[in-house]
Amino acid sequence: MRFIKRHSLELQFWGYETGNVCAAIAGAGGFAALSQALRETTLSNPHPLAALSFLFTQLPDAAATLSVMALVVFAFPIAALARKLGGASAAELVHALAIPLAFALLLFGLFNAVNAFTLSASAFVMGSCLLRLGTLFPILIKFGGLFLAMGGAALSLAGLTLPIAGVAQTGLALTTFFVGFYAAGAGLLTYIGGSALIASQIGVVPGKTLVSRFLHPKTGTLALGLTWMFDYVVTLICDRLVRPAIFWASRETKEKRPFYLAMVARLPWRIIAIAFALASETELGFAFALSNLLWAVGDIALGAIDAPDPAPLSPGVIIR
């Protein structure tokens, strides 16, 4: 457990983000289906630009899946390299550039009606990109929580679209729905956590630049807009639905251990989903089982932060 606590951020990244990549691959039909689509694309379009154009116009699921992979590599390992070469400012610039790219990917998925698994992965990556800058601009924690909730909702929708012929496939559809439901709830709890963090800040100095004024945690345009449109609704949903739905968690966990609660809420459904996904004996099921296994690694790393053996909170964690 001490090792997990010490390397929580790294384990969360490799668990959650590679899990997102596998979920996008599931949306493309699985590893074999994606490989076949790419092979046919390159054979019929030998020029790289022609192949890329064909992917985005004819095979949007495959294109979105590849884009999720590219964005994960761009937003995180490249940011780490930038930090080593140019310091914290260079890494923050990479993270900032990743946000419009992630948003463009999400819009591409919405307008091209990509598979709900792929759309879910795109929304999760968007939320992660926002949360990575949460230490600089706390309002982005709230904004990122909404995208995490969107990713969970898309995952629940993916469960509703799966076939229900046979016990294994029916179980996979149901558990996928519940995995998405609790992931969406965790996203809304992230929003609440961002609100609490902002409320605890006293005497926040107004920003001097246009960006810092826009992202000011209390008086910025984004903060005022989120407060007016979402604060009441999100709080109501969390109080009436999300927290009661985690009925197996103790009151002490719900009140004092938000990261451990996020693990307790989702880890059982991850395990059940893995079992049914493997039992379905499909390419999609195998990819989704792998994504849940990797997400479970992220859940465990997250829960270790304030598990019953108390440890200081690590900065910049991702709640999903």
Image: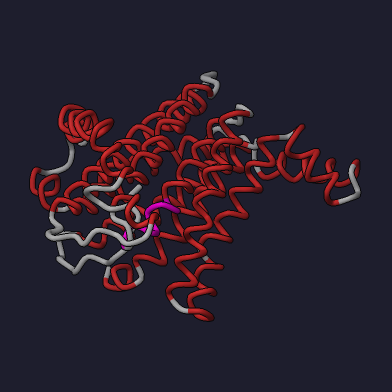
Principal SS element in the magenta part?
Answer: helix
Residue 19 belongs to magenta span: no
Q: Where is residue 147 in the image (x, y as percent from the top left)?
A: 40, 40
The range drawn in magenta is 128-135
User: Is 44 situated above or below 208?
Assistant: above
The residue located at (56%, 35%) in the rendering is 107
Q: Position of residue 55 (x, y in %)?
A: 76, 39
- In this figure, which colouring scheme has been used for the structure? secondary structure
Query: Relative to 5, is 159 on the left or the right?
Result: right
Q: Where is residue 237 in the image (x, y as percent from the top left)?
A: 22, 29
User: Is 3 situated above or below 58?
Assistant: below
Residue 130 belongs to magenta span: yes
Picture mark count: 0
Farthest residue to the bottom: give it. 85
Query: Relative to 200, is 9 on the left or the right?
Result: right
Image quarter of residue 6: bottom left
The residue located at (47%, 41%) in the rendering is 123
Between residue 103 and residue 239, name the one nearer to us: 103
Q: Position of residue 231 (x, y in %)?
A: 22, 35
Query: Relative to 136, is 94 on the left or the right?
Result: right
The residue located at (26%, 61%) in the rendering is 304
Image quarter of residue 302: bottom left
Between residue 279 and residue 182, name the one nearer to us: 182
Image quadrant where one finds the N terminus: bottom left
The residue located at (23%, 37%) in the rendering is 227
Between residue 62 and residue 233, name the one nearer to us: 233
Image quarter of residue 210: bottom left
